[in-house]
Amino acid sequence: MFVRWRRRPLRREQDLALDALLVQSVWTAGTPRQRVVRYLATIQARYRTAPAHRYAFWQGAERRLETLDLPPETRQALEAQLAQQVPRPTPEELAQVAAWRRAFAYLGEPPALGEAPSGHENARLHSDGH
């Protein structure tokens, strides 16, 4: 088994999505074919260097690899193949992502449509829309 990368153009953006697929070589009618065993994860090409996106990629890939009951050496080899295209985030990068999340956590959920954010008493919408 090995990782095959599929590049897909995105419709609304000028970017590519990189899909990591776990494939197995099988012989069919005397020719080798690649059979997709499992989709592993996707990342947009422009975000391969962004720690938060790499973290999300690896979370998905690890979750899906766990479902396959692979021998440890096979899993390590597959993870090494994934890391060639999408490096694992470093502990420093993970700490930076956590700090960003804490910094923006105070924002909470956006207000419901027609409501002003809390603390903005003068910004309330009147029922007649003025």
Image (cartoon, helix red, strand yellow):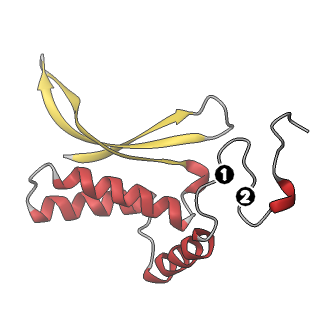
Dividing the picture into quadrants, the one containing residue 80 is bottom left
Viewer-nearest residue: 98 or 80: 98
Q: How many residues crowd mark 1 within 10 Å: few (<14), some (14–19), many (20+)?
A: few
Q: State left or right for residue 49 relative to residue 78.
A: right
Query: What x and y, as percent, mark residue 45?
Result: 56, 49
What amino acid is found at the position of numbered circle 2 in the picture? Answer: Pro
> In front: 15, or 104?
104
Residue at mark 1 to residue at mark 2: CA–CA distance: 6 Å
Q: Classify the position of the C terminus by image quarter.
A: top right
Q: Position of residue 31 (x, y in %)?
A: 18, 23
Q: Is residue 39 above or below residue 92?
A: above
* Residue for badge 2: 117
Residue 58 position (above or below residue 90): above
Q: How many marks?
A: 2
Q: Quadrant of residue 89?
A: bottom left
Q: Are marks 1 and 2 in contact (CB under 8 Å)?
A: yes
Q: Which residue is mark 1?
A: 111
SS state under label 2: loop
Q: Tell whether 120 sits left or right of 20.
A: right
Place of residue 76 in the rendered image (x, y in percent of width and height, measured from the top left): 21, 65
Q: Residue at x 85, y 33 (%)?
A: 128
Vertical order, 64 against 120 (above or below)? above
Residue name at image x 8 percent, y 53 percent: 69
Identify the mark nearer the N-term, 1 or 2.
1
Query: Foreground residue, 79 or 122?
Result: 122
Look at 21% across and 53% down and name the residue there. 65
Looking at the rendered structure, the kind of residue marked 1 is Pro
Q: Identify the image quadrant of residue 113.
A: top right
Nearest the camera: 99 or 77? 99
Q: Residue furthest right?
A: 130
